Structures are given as structure tokens and as C-alpha cells.
Image: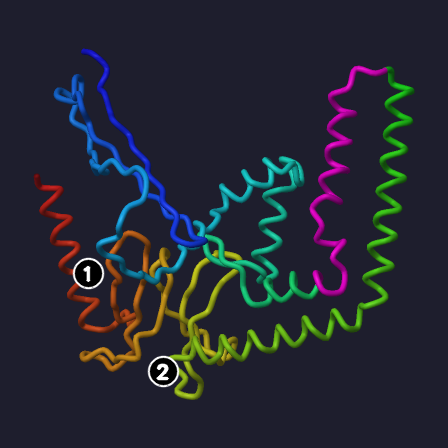
Amino acid sequence: CDDALIDRKRISGKIEDYTFSTSGYHITKKSWMEFYPVRTNEREIPDAEGKKTIKESRTEEKETKPPKRFSQASIISELEKRNLGTKATRAAILETLYNRGYIREKSIEATPVGISLIETLEKYSPIIIDEKLTKVLQDEMDEIVESSKPVPELKKEGEKILEQAKENIVEVLKEFQEKESLIGKDLMNAQESQIKIERKENALNMCPKCKKNNLRITYSPKNRKFFIACSGYPACKNTYSLPPYGTIKQTGKECEKCGFPLLMAIQKGKKPWIFCFNSECPTNKERIKEYKKKLEEKNEK
């Protein structure tokens, strides 16, 4: 088949100090597209030259969409792209951030403490979070590894790099120690603030087992999952599982069958799911029974 022909057009106009533009296209010859249909969104734009009169105008208020969150794989890829860390250390860096509560979720989200840490270091010791500090050292080390220079010459270069690294570390420590108390105070305040917010947001109903403390939504850095546990732990070890994917939110409503709070699981590309987390609730028993029935029917086919 011949090549398809597409007429693309873009026009722009100026009103006072503002420039407006629009674009569109029209398929003039389909050729192979007749046999291999592709999804298109043709939009013809009329010719416009010289001064024109505007017949209609409207103002629309919109918000820009935030960039897609990093996943564990994509952030490691980004670190590699920026030549930060090594193959052996990048995964460990990510693990440390999770374990210390600076980030959470599989679709990575910075916690209030993580955000406060960066803001505090930017304020008092910006050199610590300057990626150039690490990148320059890593680039120089990579050059030595890939170099074909004589060993004595490489040894001299290596010693020079190590000396520079020592100077950088001394400078970082000096700057940090000078403002250590201020940094510690800000981070302590952030930690206390996060604890208060999380307690309020994650508090649920009274624990039916110990009848003394409340149930609350808890995050496990080790398993990287949310679950529900009694606030009286370790005296009371009552727990409930939650869906492994998506964000869990409270609905402010109660289950009609058992009186437990209803939660909502929000997952990208799927309809929000409202559910009761009580494993003994009749709604869950009915749902499990229905699921098993469908599974049996599927296996019979």
C-alpha cells in the first residue's frame, strides 16, 4: 500500500500581549489505514491569515496534572540515569528510605517526615542533599575503572579523588554540627506532628477484642503494606488485613450488618471499592462464598 497522507495544521494568534494557538489534522489519503484501522481523532482547522474577528470566547479554569509517581523500579532507573549510587547500593538506599518512614506505598509517596527532612536540610545544610556532590565523585571513580592509563597514574588519581571526598565529608560534618540542634528540633517537631495527624486520620472503632483501645490503620515498612491493628499492641495483638493495592481511605460510614467502619480502596484505573474490613461480617462471608462459587464454575468449564 501507499503511504497515508495527513494534512497537519497549526495556527496561532495574538491578542494584546497574549499568544494563543491550536492545531489539528485531516487524513487526505487513507491508503494502508483502510486495511489496518487505527484510532484517530481528526480535527480540521480552517485557514486563517491576517486579522480576524473573534466571534466567541470563553475562559476555562483548569489545574495542571501532577507528574506520575515513581515506582521502585522507575526511581532506581532514575538514579542510574543520574549516575547516583551503584548497582549494589541503589536498592539499599530505597530500602533505607522505606524503613525510616521517609517514603511509603509501592507508588512512592513522601511522608510528612520525609518532606520535612528535605526542607530542614535545604534550610540549614543544603550541601548534604546536593546530588552534584555524589555525582562528581561517582563520575570520577567510573573514569578510573574504565581508564587504560598505567596503574601508577591511576593510583595517583584515585588518591586525589579520595582526598577530595574527605574534604567534602569534613565540610558537610562541620556545617551539620554547627546547626545540629536546630536541625534536630525541626525534625522532632515534624515527627510529633506526623504522629498526631496519623493518629487522628487512622483511628477507627474500639477494638472488639480488648474493648479498651481503638483499632487504627497501620503501615508496616517491613512488608510495605497497610493493615489494621489495635493501638494497645503488644498487650492486644488483634489485627485485620487490608487490600494489598491502592490507597485506603475512611468513608465516615458504618457497615449496616456489623457496625464496623466502612473503608474505601482507591486504585488507579478502577472504580473505588467500599468494603467492611471485619472478616466475621456477613457481607464478607457472602462475598467469599460468591467468589468460591464463581471459581468452581470456571474450573468446571
Whether residue 22 is in magenta: the answer is: no
Q: Which residue is mark 1?
A: 288
Instruction: Give coordinates of residue 74: x percent, y percent.
Output: 49, 42
Please name the amino acid that badge 1 sits on. Ile
Q: Is residue 124 magenta?
A: yes
Colour scheme in use: rainbow
* Residue at image coords 37%, 57%: 244
* Of marks 2 and 1, the one in the foreground: 2
- With respect to residue 247, does 161 lie above or below? above
Most frequent secondary structure within the magenta stretch: helix
- The foreground one among 153 and 219 is 153
Q: Quadrant of the N terminus?
A: top left
Is the Cβ of the residue at disc 2 closer than 8 Å to that at disc 1? no
The answer to whether residue 207 is left or right of residue 96 is left
Which element carries disc 1, helix, strand or loop?
helix
Q: Is residue 258 above or below residue 221?
A: below
Few, some or many residues within 10 Å of mark 2 (<14, 14–19, 20+): some
Query: Is 27 above or below relative to 201?
Result: above
Residue 31 point in image, percent of width and height: 16, 17
Residue type at the position of mark 2: Asn
Quarter that holds the C terminus:
top left
Separation (CA) of disc 2 from disc 1: 24 Å
| Magenta region, residue range | 121-149
Q: Position of residue 137 (x, y in %)?
A: 77, 37
Residue located beneath label 2 in the image: 205
Place residue 152 in its image quadrant. top right
Q: Residue drawn at (19%, 27%), measured in percent from left and top?
A: 27
Residue 87, quarter of the rendered image = top right
